[in-house]
Image (cartoon, grey):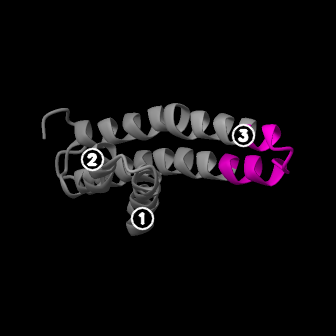
Amino acid sequence: MWWRSLWILIACWLLCAHFVRYEQINFAIPFAIAPLALCFNSVYLLRLLQVLLFVSVFTVWGVTTIEAIQMRLAQEAPWLRLSFIMMAVMLFTLGAIICGNGILRIRRQKSPWGNSPIR
């Protein structure tokens, strides 16, 4: 289960590094501390983290990809490798979201309450 948490941690820290690069510390700090939600045994916090990562795939990585490719095209520079790298980052983030589902499944199996909605 530790590797699932590691995927989520790396995905959040990639987003944090993206915002630090553009000196947007107000957005970087929440992504830096977001993986702490994994320490709590709360389904709601993990789902919130997954939603945050899912939204960031489109609003952060998607927009950054389009802007970077447009900049490369305007400069008549190669852009295909950039698109593959950004696609890999987006797929990695989506993979981290899927790993969150595995964390929930494992927690339910280890829980003495099973699938009870009250925890």
**Label 3 SS:** helix
Dominant secondary structure of the magenta stretch? helix
Q: Nearer the viewer, residue 86 or 47?
A: 86
Q: Nearer the viewer, residue 95 or 24?
A: 24
* Cα distance between the residues tagged 3 and 1: 33 Å
In the rendered structure, the answer to whether residue 10 lies left or right of residue 73 reads left
In the rendered structure, the answer to whether residue 86 lies left or right of residue 59 reads right
| Amino acid type for the residue under numbered disc 2 | Pro
- Label number found at residue 6: 1
- Label number found at residue 37: none
The outermost residue toward the left is 119
Task: Residue under label 2, please give it.
Answer: 30
How would you rate the neighbour count of disc 2 (Cα within 10 Å): few for under 14, some for 14-19, many for 20 or more? few
Asked if the residue at tag 1 contacts the one at tag 2, i.e. Cβ–Cβ closer than 8 Å, the answer is no
65 drawn magenta? no
Q: Earlier in the sequence, mark 2 or mark 1?
A: 1
Which quarter of the rendered picture does the N terminus lie within? bottom left
Task: List x then y, in percent, for residue 18.
Answer: 47, 52
**Label 1 SS:** helix
Task: Residue under label 3, please give it.
Answer: 71
Magenta residue span: 71-87
Asked if the residue at tag 1 contacts the one at tag 3, i.e. Cβ–Cβ closer than 8 Å, the answer is no
Can I make out residue 115 in this image?
A: no
76 drawn magenta? yes
Q: Quadrant of residue 74?
A: top right
**Count of labels in the image:** 3
Can I make out residue 118 in this image?
A: yes
Name the residue located 85 percent from the left edge and 51 percent from the top edge: 78
Task: List x then y, in percent, for residue 116.
Answer: 20, 36
